[in-house]
Structures are given as structure tokens and as C-alpha cells.
Image: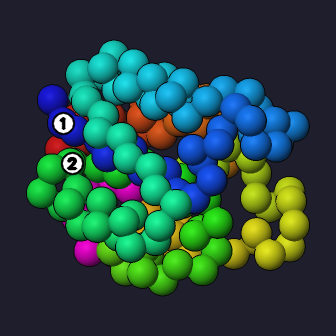
Amino acid sequence: MATIALLHGPNLNLLGSREPLIYGTASLAEYVATTTAAAAASGHTVQAFQSNLEGELVEAIQLARDTAAAIIINPGAFTHYSWAIHDALAAFSGPVVEVHISNPSARESWRLTSVVAPVAMGSIVGFGMHGYELAVAAIARVLDAR
């Protein structure tokens, strides 16, 4: 059994009420519960954290180096410009999956760049809650193959 760090960036605490046509009506708690259930079904656990502050997310990634075997991260707007999060993830030795509820490529042009993708094993975008389940399935396969 391994622990998966589930990290959420800015404004994701507003899930369920913020732009429901884009992000749906499920709350952050529902995303965490669904991800936790998917991990448990694969024999793994989830350690969830959300912050609107870049430095707190960097610290959570650094902490995960000692407490988690993998990271699922939805960096929110930090996706597009946080080299600090990029560098922290690059220093993490386990698999990292970048997840986005919507498909950033189908939205505003400034969302086309991800500075997180180059240090992630993969990215899952546009599948809403199912994207988190897919991320758990992918990570579980990688961890179980080790």
C-alpha cells in the first residue's frame, strides 16, 4: 500500500460554486472522496491538500518526498507560470500526474502553456471527476509494477 498526495491549487476550494458550466457542481470534498475511494480500491491511500498559496503547494510537494509514493496535482492557474511548482515536482522521485477538470487547450489561449507537464509522467484533462479516477488508475499501475 502506498500513499498518493492529492494536491489542489488556487480557487479549487470553490469547486461546486465557481463557474459550474466549466467545472461542474461537485465540491472539492467530493473530488477528494472519489479519489480516495478509487485509491482504496487499488490498495492505496490518499493524502489531500489544497492551497491558494504557491509557497504552501511547494512545501506540500517537498513534504510528499518523504510521505508519498506519487502525486496527483491540479495546480489550477499555477499550471501556466509557476516555475517554483515545476522545480519542486522535478525534485520528486515518484510518478506525478497533472489533472485538470476542464480541457485548458479548449479555453483561453493563455491556458495553452503548462509548466507542470514537462515534469509530470502524464496529464489528464477535460474528464471532470473521471480524470481523477483515471489518474489513480494510472498511478496504481505504475506503483504496482515497481
Callout 2, which amino acid? Ala
Residue toward you, 69 or 58: 58
Q: Where is residue 44 shown, x and y percent of the image? A: 25, 28
* Residue marked by disc 2: 69
Q: Main secondary structure of the magenta part?
A: loop
Q: Which residue, as the protein is rendered here, is positioned at the far left?
A: 66
Residue toward you, 80 or 137: 80
The quarter of the picture where residue 110 lies is bottom right
Q: In the rendered image of this protein, does residue 108 appear above or below residue 124? A: below
Q: Is residue 122 visible?
A: no
Color scheme of the displayed model: rainbow
Element carrying mark 1: loop
Q: Quadrant of the C terminus?
A: top left
Span colored in magenta: 89-96
For marks 2 and 1 on the same chain, the one whose residue lies earlier in the sequence: 1
Task: Identify the residue shown where x is 86% and y is 59%.
Answer: 107
Residue 90 on the magenta segment: yes
Task: Identify the residue shown where x is 70% and y is 32%.
Answer: 16
The quarter of the picture where residue 88 lies is bottom left
Q: Where is residue 130 shown, x and y percent of the image? A: 61, 29
Callout 1, which amino acid? Ala
How packed is label 2: few (under 14 Cα within 10 Å), some, or many (20 or more)?
Answer: many
Q: Where is residue 122 shown, x and y percent of the image? A: 50, 56
Q: In the rendered image of this protein, does residue 78 appear above or below residue 23? A: below
* Residue marked by disc 1: 2
Residue 87 on the magenta segment: no
Task: Identify the residue shown where x is 30% and y is 20%.
Answer: 40
Q: Quadrant of the N terminus?
A: top left
78 horizontally vs 57: left or right: right
Distance, label 2 to label 1, CA atoms, is 6 Å
